Image (cartoon, rainbow, N blue to C red):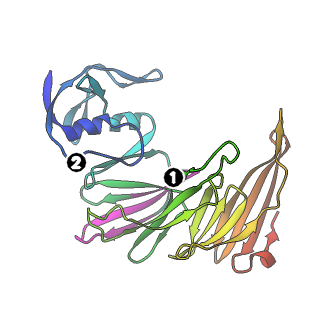
């Protein structure tokens, strides 16, 4: 059976699972076939043969064929595989992100047209998300952050930090970590309209090489941040000047491993940041598999060396 559907719908049904996928804005009507394909994950049917499903009160096909290519409904596929989907109709963008996250903070703000938007920060464990949902249309934007701590609200908008990409120019066998990792600081204004709602990159942070990764980030104010790295460092960084200061560097250890044995590998993570005082944990493998050296420390960021105290 042939139907005439918008190319926008065909593209929406055919999108692959990835973050921040932009749809084509130059739409036209095309002939497509409602196909009877069956889609399974493991032993369960996601889409049965000839199945339709309800979307906004309309019967939608379980699959389409156009130019010998099969297109599947991204919402049905992602939700069946335990993911969430956000559809932003203003910028024609689909975003797929993780499910089952805990809410960290939620606020409501008005845009330039007096419409209410809901801002939610979600914790996904190793990363965080900022979702922004329109009061009436339920159009939603979703942005991945370094962590659920990596945001800051002020009176005019929200700032958040995210990984942009690795730049490995010049890397070689002798220098595999050449280049740098780039992180963006983005600001979205509460009164944004549809032409500016994705915000602007206001600052960037570059790591010394691609082997250094930022694992967590906190805003001190609109110009300064504190972040941790996979090198067991806590760093204070001035976004405006680009200058960095190491507040804490864990003592070096010799990394080694073998059958049933690992020593030195682990992580540093902040457990509390309040009133300029940081509490953090260092966790490292300690010999036999399963054994770990774990210690907790705290210090004041204004006098880190002299105020460092081991808690346990």
Res. 57 in view: no
Specify whether 189 is left or right of 254.
left
Q: Quadrant of residue 40?
A: top left
Identify which residue, 118 or 229, lies in the foreground: 229
Residue in the foreground of this view, choosing between 181 and 6? 181
Name the residue carrying label 2. Answer: 25
| Residue located 69% across and 70% down the image | 278
Q: Which of the image's four quarters has the C terminus? A: bottom right
Vertically, is 241 above or below 41? Answer: below
| Mark identifier at residue 148 | none
Residue position marked by numbered label 1 in the rendering = 165
Query: Considering only vertical position in the picture, is 176 above or below 16?
Result: below
Q: CA distance from mark 1 to mark 2?
A: 26 Å
Q: Quadrant of residue 245?
A: bottom right
* Image spot of residue 122 (x, y percent): 49, 56
Helix, strand or loop under label 1:
strand
- The span picked out in magenta is 106-131
The image position of residue 275, as x and y in percent, is 64, 78
Q: Residue at x 46, y 20 (%)?
A: 43
The nearer-to-camera label among 1 and 2 is 1
| Residue 110 within the segment the image draws in magenta | yes
Mark 1 vs 2, N-terminal side: 2
Placement of the N terminus among the 4 image quadrants: top left
* Position of residue 115 measured from the top left corner of the image (x, y, whole percent): 25, 67
């Amino acid at each position: 059976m042939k139907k005439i559907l918008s190319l926008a719908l065909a593209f929406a049904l055919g999108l692959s699972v990835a973050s921040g996928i932009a749809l084509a804005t130059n739409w036209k009507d095309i002939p497509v076939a409602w196909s009877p394909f069956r889609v399974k994950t493991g032993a369960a049917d996601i889409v049965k043969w000839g199945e339709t499903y309800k979307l906004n009160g309309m019967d939608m096909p379980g699959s389409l064929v156009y130019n010998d290519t099969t297109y599947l409904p991204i919402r049905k596929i992602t939700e069946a595989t335990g993911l969430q989907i956000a559809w932003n109709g203003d910028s024609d963008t689909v975003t797929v992100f993780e499910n089952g996250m805990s809410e960290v903070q939620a606020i409501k703000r008005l845009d330039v047209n007096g419409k209410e938007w809901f801002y939610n920060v979600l914790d996904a464990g190793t990363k965080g998300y900022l979702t922004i949902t329109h009061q009436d249309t339920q159009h939603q934007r979703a942005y991945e952050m370094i962590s659920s701590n990596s945001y800051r609200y002020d009176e005019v908008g929200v700032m958040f930090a995210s990984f942009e990409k690795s730049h490995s120019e010049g890397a070689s066998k002798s220098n595999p970590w050449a280049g740098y990792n780039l992180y963006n600081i983005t600001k979205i204004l509460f009164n944004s309209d549809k032409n500016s709602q994705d915000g602007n990159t206001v600052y960037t942070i570059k790591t010394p090489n691609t082997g250094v990764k930022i694992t967590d980030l906190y805003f001190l104010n609109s110009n300064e941040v504190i972040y941790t790295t996979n090198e067991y460092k806590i760093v204070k960084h001035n976004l405006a000047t680009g200058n960095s200061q190491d507040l804490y560097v864990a003592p070096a250890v010799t990394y080694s491993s073998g059958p049933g044995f690992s020593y030195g590998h682990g992580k540093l993570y902040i457990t509390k940041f309040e009133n300029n005082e940081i509490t953090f944990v260092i966790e490292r493998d300690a010999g036999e598999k399963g054994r770990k050296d774990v210690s907790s420390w705290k210090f004041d960021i204004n006098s880190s060396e002299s105020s460092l105290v081991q808690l346990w």
